[in-house]
Amino acid sequence: SVSIEKEFRFFNDASFGLLGDDEAKTVVESMLDFLDFCLKKNDGKTIVEVIDGIRILYNYYTNHHLKGLVHMILKKSVELHGNLMRDNKYKEALNMKNQLGFFEERVPIEMKRQVLDQALEFHNRLLKEGDFETAKKVKDEYEIMGIYTPADMIDAVIKAAIKYLSDCIRKGEFNKANVVIEEYNIPAPEVKERASEDLKYLLASEKYELAFDTLLKFKISTDDEELREIAEKLSPPKEVVELETDHFYTGALDILVEKIVEFLNDVEQNHKI
């Protein structure tokens, strides 16, 4: 069919206008059968080669058969695009998006939104599985945080990013946490709120050294009532260190850090014994 189109330029208003109604319907049905066949095989590569070859998506038509065919090609191609993402065939899905121009002006807005929804679902799943690098590619290549992206979609992206940020904090991966904060432009209040919740989790899990690192890294206030309640439920203090200041100037903070390091070293030695 590709070679025929290149030779005769069949898919245009003038050529279709020469066909009878039944003949035009037969051509459309044959193309739809081909699309359904590719859908069943999850074959995005063949669809792209054929659709790009016959150049049917790159013009505007007045013939109602051609207009209907273009709509169905886009609809079924978008469906296949979602299937490819579901099956982790990202490169094939991305190529289909680029080659068929899913975000171009001629594509109906509801189909553009469908493609964005597919990309968002795939992106969030990648973050949940810990594949940050691929998730970042999806975010950038589909512009799911772009200026034309609906607010509810951006909120969903940020929510997934904050969950991944939490995973990084709880693992002590602070460098990666910094990258996530910058990459997704997570507001500082939301970062501190998430880090505070993670600090409570770390304390309750008796991961004291990581909890202390988190406290300093994100400058979390110890005035939080729930945080104090968790701390009070822990074992009694080994030593009380009093600092004659209302604020952590450099010297006072150095003294506190020194005492905590001594305590952690002592705990480590006792565990070895």
Image (tube, rainbow, N blue to C red):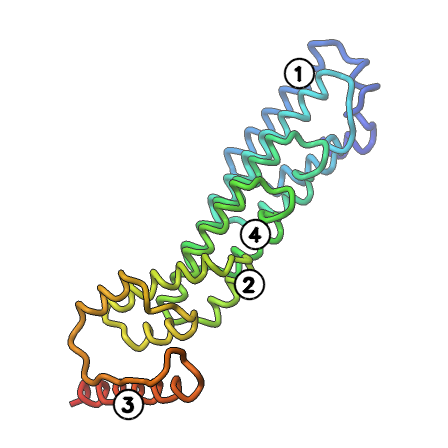
- Label 1: few (<14), some (14–19) or many (≥20) C-alpha neighbours in 10 Å: few
Q: How crowded is mark 3: few (under 14 residues within 10 Å), some or many (20 or more)?
A: few
Give the CA distance from mark 2 to mark 1: 54 Å
C-alpha span from label 1 to label 4: 39 Å
Few, some or many residues within 10 Å of mark 2 (<14, 14–19, 20+): few
**Residue at which label 4 appears:** 138
**In front: 99, or 152?**
152
| Cα distance in 3D space between marks 2 and 3 | 34 Å
Q: Which of marks 3 and 1 is in front?
A: 3
Picture quadrant where residue 76 is located: top right
Viewer-nearest of labels 1 and 4?
A: 4
Does the residue at mark 3 contact the one at mark 4 (Cβ under 8 Å)?
A: no
Residue at point 43%, 69% (across, down) = 218
Specify which label sits upstream in the sequence, 2 or 4: 4
Mark 3 → mark 1, Cα distance in angstroms: 83 Å
What residue is shown at x 43% (from left), y 62% (from top)? 192
Of label 3 and label 4, which has the lower sequence position?
Answer: 4
Read off the residue under disc 2: 182
Please give the residue where the numbered disc 3 appears in the rendered image. Answer: 262
Relative vertical location of residue 2 with respect to residue 271 in this rendering, above or below: above
Tag 3, which secondary structure?
helix
Write down the residue under mark 1.
Answer: 26
For marks 3 and 1, the one nearer the N-term is 1
Q: How far apart, in angstroms, are the residues tagged by discs 2 and 4?
A: 16 Å
- The foreground one among 210 and 250 is 250
Give the x, y percent position of residue 211: 32, 72
